[in-house]
Image (spheres, helix red, strand yellow):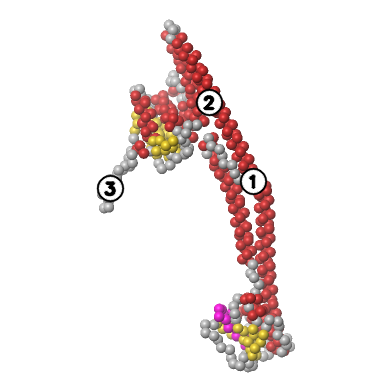
Amino acid sequence: MTPSLRVLASLWVVLAMLAGGGSVWLWMSSTAAWNAHLDRAYSAGLALADSLEAGSALPPGLTLSQLRREPELPPGWRQTVITLTGGGRPDLAQGARLSVRIQSPDLTYPVAEVQSVGGGSQAAGLASVTRSLARFCSDPRLFVQQDTGPWMRIDGAPVWGCGAAPADRRLWAAALAAGTTAVLLGWVAEVSGAFAAFAAALRDHRARNAALPVGGALELRQTAEAVNAYVAQDRAALENRALVLSGVSHDLGTPATRLRLRSAMIEDDALRERLERDIDEMTTMIDGVLTYTRAEIGAEPFRRLSLTSLAEAVVADYQDVGLPVTLRQASPPPARAGTLFSRSASRPTVDSHALLMRGQPTALRRALSNLIDNALKYGREAQVLTGGSADEAWIGVTDRGSVLTEGDLERLTGAFQRGENAGTAGGVGLGLAIVSTIAAQHGGRLEFHRAAEGLEARLVLARSWA
C-alpha cells in the first residue's frame, strides 16, 4: 500500500533525527578518543622525563636502549633536533640539558609545538614531543641525551605509533550525514516531481482525452483518481450531449424536409423566402452546436498529414464554386552563394508540401473552413498562407477590409458571438469558438494579427502533439 504524506513526513523526521544523532555521536566519540590518545602520549612523556632524571621505572609501552655512538640518520630520512633546558624541578633554576632527535622517513616534526624550547620544564617539553609523535602517523625513532651522556633510543610504538591511534570515525559521521541528506532530498524530489508531473498533465490540453498519471503519495493518487473520474464523467456528458444533438438533428430532418416541401406551395414569394430562411437558420444552428460539441470531445484519431496539401484541398473547394479564396506559398529561403567546396551556386529549397504534422484532418478542415468563412463574411476575400518551424505549423487566413477591433476579436472567440458587421449573413456565432477549441486540442492557439490588406487569423498548431 502506498504510504500517505503524513507517514512519509514522519519517517523523514525520524530518520533525520536518528541520522543526525548518530553522526554527532560518531564525531564526538572519535574526537574524545583522539584527545584521550594524545593525553596518554603526553602523560607517557612526563613519566619518561621523570624516569630519565630520577631513574624510576619506565611507563607502560616504553622501552629504553643505550647506544654506543651517536645515532646515524638513514638515507632519505628526515631529522628534527630539539634541545630542552631547565632544571626539571621548581627549586632548580637551571639544570642538565636534554638533547632530543627525532628521525622519520616521512616528515619533519614541528618544533613550535614543543612548549619549553629554550627554557622551562624539561618534562613538559619532552611530553610535548611525545604528544607530537602521537599526532602524526609515522614510524619515528626517538633518541635522547642528557648533557654529554650516552645517547639512548626510546621505543614507544605502543604509545605513539600508528597502531596505537584510535580509529577516526569522523569521515563515517560525515558520510552518514551526507548520505541521509541525499536520501531525504531524493525522497522529497520524488514526491515533488510526482506533484509537478501531475500539475503538468493537468495543464495539458489533452487532459480531457487522456487519463492523468496515477502514482506517488496516497493523497496524490486519490487526487488523480478523483480528477480522472471527473474527466471521465465530463467526457461522458459531452458524448451524451453530442448523441442527443445528433439524434435531434436527425429527427428534425424529416419535419424540416416536409416544411420545405410545404413552403414551396406557398404562392406569396416574400412569405415563402422568410419561411425557408427560418428553416435554414434552425438547421444551421443545430448543426453548429453539434459540430462544436464534437470538437470539444475530439474523438477523431490523430494521423500524419501534410498541412499544405490540406489547405490546397480546402481552397480548391471554395474556388470550384467561384469564391474569392486564394492560396499563397510561403517565400522560400534566399539561395546561398557557392563556396570553394560546393558544386553548385545554390542549394535546392525545401518542398512546401513537406510541412508534415500529426493532427485530426477532419477537425483541421473544419477549422480552416470556419476561418475562410469568417474572412469572406467580414471582408471581401480570403488569402490562405501556410508556414511553420521545427516545433509548430500554422495556417493564416487574411481578409480584406475588415474593421474588427481587438475587443471584437476577443469577444468573437466565445460561443454564440457574431461581429457587428455580419449583417444578414448566416451563422450562429460558433465559428471561431470551434477553431479555438480545435487549436487547443492540437496544442496550439488562435492568434490575430493586423495585416496591410486587412486582418489575419492564424491557427498555430504543434507539429507533434499526440
Q: CA distance from mark 1 to mark 3?
A: 64 Å
* First in sequence: mark 3 vs mark 2: 2
Residue ID for mark 2: 242
Q: Give the residues drawn in magenta, as a range.
A: 99-110
Residue 103 to residue 205: above or below: below
Query: Mark 3 or mark 2, which is nearer to you?
Result: 2
Looking at the picture, tell me which residue is in the foreground, 39 or 19: 19
- The residue furthest top is 267
Q: Going by the image, does 195 lie left or right of 464?
A: right
Which of 199/212 is in front? Answer: 212
Residue at 66%, 79% in the rendered image: 158
Tell me which residue sits at (43%, 32%) in the image: 361
- The first of marks 1 and 3 along the sequence is 1
Under circle 2, the secondary element is helix
| Label of residue 2 in the image | 1
Disc 1 residue crowd, few under 14, some 14–19, many 20+, Cα 10 Å: few
The number of discs equals: 3
Circle 3 residues within 10 Å: few <14, some 14–19, many ≥20: few
- What type is the residue that disc 2 sits on? Ala
Which residue occupies the foreground of this view, 101 or 98? 101
Magenta stretch holds residue 104: yes
User: Which amino acid type is shown beneath numbered disc 3?
Assistant: Ala
Q: Position of residue 75 (x, y in %)?
A: 52, 84
Residue 436 at least partly seen: no
Q: Where does residue 171 sit, x and y in percent of width and height?
A: 61, 66
Tell me the residue that label 3 is attached to.
337
